[in-house]
Amino acid sequence: MKTAITTILISLAIGVSAPLAIGTGTAFAEGPAAAAATQAPATESANPPAGAAAMTGDQKKVISQACSQQANEAGLHGKDRQKFRTACKRNGGKVVAKSAPKAS
């Protein structure tokens, strides 16, 4: 009787621990998202946007700050500010000429 109980307990322990061990192993495996993240810089450097490769992070920061300052001076908020800053940064931080209002 004692060996039957021991056999059942060993079978139960193996039955529970095997799937847990397999599940734990997959938790530490590198998934497709992590693999794609490591490959992303190679594809981006192969086809950089025009002019972006020549700019450093500090130059981009200066341009962004200049555009923010211009938006502050113009009193822009919300979507208007977002559109202005996007156009300004694309123009290298220079003042973006506003288009004349459409005649109705």
Image (spheres, rainbow, N blue to C red):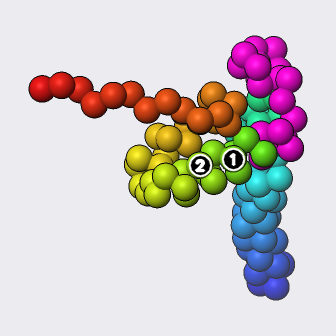
User: Which disc, if any, is residue 34?
Assistant: none
Identified by mark 2, the residue type is: Gln
Asked if disc 1 and disc 2 are in contact, CB closer than 8 Å, the reply is yes
User: Which disc, if any, is residue 70?
Assistant: 2
Rendered residue at 12%/26% (across/down): 104
Rendered residue at 65%/33% (across/down): 94
Rendered residue at 77%/39% (across/down): 60
- Among the 4 quarters of the image, the one containing residue 11: bottom right
Q: Which residues are magenta?
A: 43-61
Rendered residue at 85%/23% (across/down): 54
Whether residue 18 is visible, yes or no, is no
- Among the 4 quarters of the image, the one containing residue 91: top right
Magenta segment includes 52: yes
Foreground: 1 or 98?
98
In the picture, the quarter occupied by the N terminus is bottom right
The local secondary structure at tag 1 comes to helix
